[in-house]
Amino acid sequence: MLDEKTQDFIRTHREEDVRRLALKPASENVDLRMALQQIEGWQTARRKLPSWAERDGILYPPRLPMEQCSSEQTARYKQALVKRLLDNNGTEAPHTLMDLTGGFGIDFSFLAPLFDRAVYMERQPELCRIAAHNFKTLGLAQAEIRETDSSLSPDEWPDAACCFVDPARRDTAGRKTVAIEDCEPNLSILQEAIRRKAAFSLIKLSPMLDIRTALRTLAHVAEVHAVSVQGECKELLLVVTRQKPEKTACHCVNLGTEDPTFTFTLTEEEEAACTYSDTPGRFLYEPNASVMKCGGFRSLATRYGLRKLHPNSHLYTSDHSCRDFPGRTFAIEDCCGFGKKELKRLLNGLGQANLTVRNFPDTVAGLRKRLKLREGGNAYLFATTLADGRHVLLRCRKAEPQ
């Protein structure tokens, strides 16, 4: 798809700034538009898809598909998840992968090796051509490309062990969307057809989507996976089965850290008894982004033997150091209200601090201005509300589990 002169241009300039390159005249017979697309794509892949960036011959799509595609970390997580599901389900269904929303094909490329046959469906011709080239380069002999709008032809879908769907989360004007009904394809309409064709499906949704809303929209959700990368929630994954599951398990995952995966069921969360505290103990615990996303707040307190500071604060405390907590652990050095004398004592000698507000009637920016503190340093301040309704400021330092 690229002539030799364009490939030479890419090899020569791929470390350079794409915006500056666009302003320079290109050599004769160089497809500058395609060259710049490949250079920008490769530069993104170095960070997002390192194993692809190291491989010669990969073609990259325009900027939007590169922005929307999964990172290698999250794609490998989905690969491990689907492998577990296949092992658990056996091989009753035909050993076929069906990807209804192929895109750049990152997730497809990591899932396809698990199957004898892998069907990639995509309605954009350019993405289909790029995928066909890349799958051949990657040695995915089981890949089958279908240039089609998959939502219009469910009767033509293959019977599959697994269906993967990553709906486009932009409207016709290019604005980002979150709700399942506003994405393409609309899974609230297609979900019955998917259950007929696939033994199970893996659905990737916006990390901004409320989980309870997703569960009300989609039936037969057996598992929810909130996948964070180094503290930022990147993906919300749902596993949907043909039969209605007895319970829905939530998996809170934080890739790139030592945080353990915290798993709970929605039934467990509903039934969990949680102790609240109006007196902070020796340690403070802040759940990671995936736990915050899934909302297993009472289950977390019960599982780790912690007290919650307030029903809506989502901060925890104990007098003992808790091992393997899925989030950050701090040693509490002091606690005070917001009277002038109290604050003066707690802030004595402090010129900068890392400030967090949870269930508190002010913003970080507003409180930082009020306290006259620069950002950073080794001190951590948490402004929050205790179980008795008092607003307090906790001065903490990072603590290693004992």
Image (tube, rainbow, N blue to C red):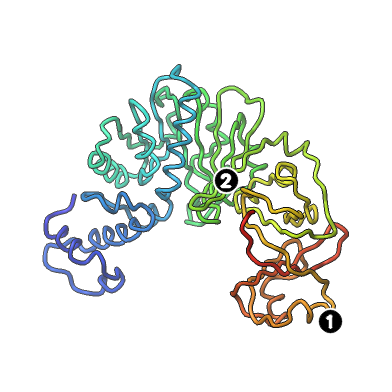
At x 14% / y 61%, what residue is drawn?
Answer: 8
At x 57% / y 43%, what residue is drawn?
Answer: 261
In the foreground, 44 or 186: 44
Image disc number at residue 272: none
The residue sitting at the right extreme is 388
Q: Are marks 1 and 2 in contact (CB under 8 Å)?
A: no
Neighbour class for label 1 at 10 Å: few (<14), some, many (≥20)? few
Neighbour class for label 2 at 10 Å: few (<14), some, many (≥20)? some
Q: Is residue 163 left or right of residue 192?
A: left
If you read the primary sequence from the N terminus, does the residue marked by circle 1 or circle 2 appear first? 2
Q: How many marks?
A: 2
At x 21% / y 64%, what residue is drawn?
Answer: 32
Q: Secondary structure at mark 2?
A: loop
Classify 154 as above or below 134.
Answer: above
Instruction: Compute the Cα span from label 1 to label 2.
Output: 41 Å
Quarter residue 394 falls in? bottom right
Residue matched to label 1: 341
Residue 120, horizontal then vertical, whole percent: 35, 35
Classify 71 as above or below 283.
Answer: above
Q: Secondary structure at mark 1?
A: helix
The residue sitting at the top extreme is 92
Q: Which amino acid type is shown beneath numbered disc 1?
A: Lys
In the foreground, 258 or 138: 258
Quarter residue 146 falls in? top left
Q: Which amino acid type is shown beneath numbered disc 2?
A: Pro
Residue 48, horizontal then vertical, whole percent: 39, 55
In the foreground, 328 or 22: 328
Residue 114, horizontal then vertical, whole percent: 37, 30
Residue 286, horizontal then vertical, whole percent: 67, 57
Classify 37 as above or below 235.
Answer: below
At x 11% / y 56%, what residue is drawn?
Answer: 4
Image disc number at residue 260: 2
